[in-house]
Every structure is written in structure tokens, then in C-alpha cells.
Image (cartoon, rainbow, N blue to C red):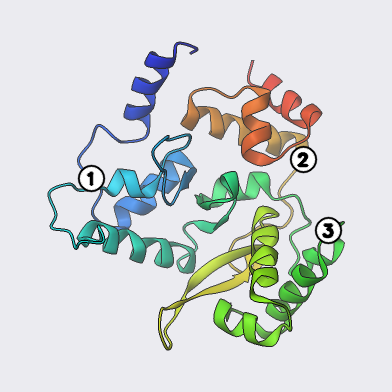
Amino acid sequence: MTDTTDLTEARLERWWLNRPPIRTLDEARAYVEDLHLCLLFGGAQARYPSLREVSRDDSVEREPSGWGADIEAMWTWKDELPVRGEAWLGRYLSGKQTLLSPALLADLYDWPGDDDDFAAVPDLSPASRKLASHLLDEGPTSTRVLRSVLGFAPKTVDKAIAELGRCLLITNFGVESGPGWDSCVLELSTRVFPLASLGPRADRDAAAAARFAGTMLVARPIDLRRAFAWPADRAAAAAGSLT
């Protein structure tokens, strides 16, 4: 499918945007399970599906900030789904907050599936290694605590969280109440999702490409490279498996 108008219209249907807004946690779970990947917020130019857009209800009353009951519900779902093991959440697609289905996460996960997988990841920053080591030793930890105990500047910790998320090594895991805003809790992905002994890499790449194509309705090598940060040869092989 190459015609831009046709693709846009087909995606409106595939991404549930021609249906009533989703309103429940179970509907949010079903959405992620069906589409396998979505951003939390899609933005003006929707490159990927988003939980915000599929739950947007323009009939609700809003505060001057734009906050309304639909956003409140979505904000709760994105915290609850990872705790229930029903969606991975972290900075992934385009560096933005992304929800992945457990099935797609298993296809994309590049490491053996051990809790200390981070130790074998090449070129991981010292801050990322220290953060992951803390989670290994201490278990789920809020970002508020991590910024306090790791000994790095807050921006360095934020970069480490993004780096570990892009590697799929950590997931958001609910929130912790405290002074001011609630603080996101992080956990090692292997402790939340079954990621060990998942089969040959080429087969999993082919499965990931098929899931991506089923959601995006196109899966060119360049699309897979952008989404999954795969090298050119890996993306080409996975895209080729679809023909």
C-alpha cells in the first residue's frame, strides 16, 4: 500500500480511530495486544498509533490545561499495564514513551533473558550500568530515589533511563507517591516479562516485522530501521521475510 491517502485511511481503521474512544483498562490492554506497539502521546503528525488518540474523548469537560477525565484514565492505564505484565513501557519509538505488547517485546529483546543482561551489553554508559545494577540488587525503584542515590546529575540519570529503555532492559513499573508529583518506578524487564530462551534471532526478527507490518500496514527496511534501530542488513532480511 503506497498511496498516502489510502494508507492514512487504512491506518485510521487499523488503529481503532474510527471507533468510540476506549474507556477501560481492559480496552487499553486489548488495544496494545492487538497493535503490539503504540506511543503514549502521538502528537500532531501521527507516525505511530497512540494510546492518547485512541482514548481521546472530545465530549469530556477539560481544565484550562487541557486535562480531562479521558487523560486521567489513560494516565492510570499506562501505569497499571506494566505492573500487570500486560505491556512494556519505556522510551523506545523515536525516543518517546512507548507501549509494547509482551509478544513484540519478546521478539525484539536482543539479550539472553537473564536479570544481569545489562552486563553483557557493549558500550553501555557507566550511569546505565550503575542504574541497572541498582535495580538488580534492590528491585523496583522510583526515579526520585535513583536520582538521589546514584551519584549522577539528574540529566545523566535521565539519559541512562532512556538508554536502558532503548535496549529494552528496563520497563516502567507503576508509580510511587511522594512529595510533589508521583515518581515513576523502574524495574528490569526480565523480572516482569518472560524473555529467556525465545528462539532463533532470525525467526524473531521475522515475527517482529510481521507484527509491525500488521499494525503499520507497510514494513519497508527503512521503516524497521527507524522503529527498531536495526542495522540495514538486519532490517532488509526481516522485511524480505514478509514477501
The answer to whether any part of residue 76 appears in the image is yes
Residue at figure coordinates x 19%, y 41% from the top left: 20
Determine whether, in the image, residue 64 is placed left or right of residue 129.
left
Q: Residue 132 location in percent, x, y?
A: 73, 72
User: Could you tell me the amino acid type at mark 3?
Assistant: Val
Q: Residues within 10 Å of mark 3 (few under 14, many from 20)?
A: some
Q: Earlier in the sequence, mark 3 or mark 2?
A: 3
Q: Is residue 92 above or below residue 241?
A: below
Give whichever of discs 2 and 1 has the lower sequence position.
1
Q: Amino acid type of disc 2?
A: Arg
**Spatial separation of the CA atoms under disc 1 and disc 3:** 40 Å
Which mark is first along the chain, 3 or 1?
1
Tell me the residue that label 2 is attached to.
201
> Relative to 52, is 191 above or below?
below
Residue under numbered circle 3: 121
Image-quadrant location for residue 120: bottom right
Q: Nearer the viewer, mark 3 or mark 2?
A: 3
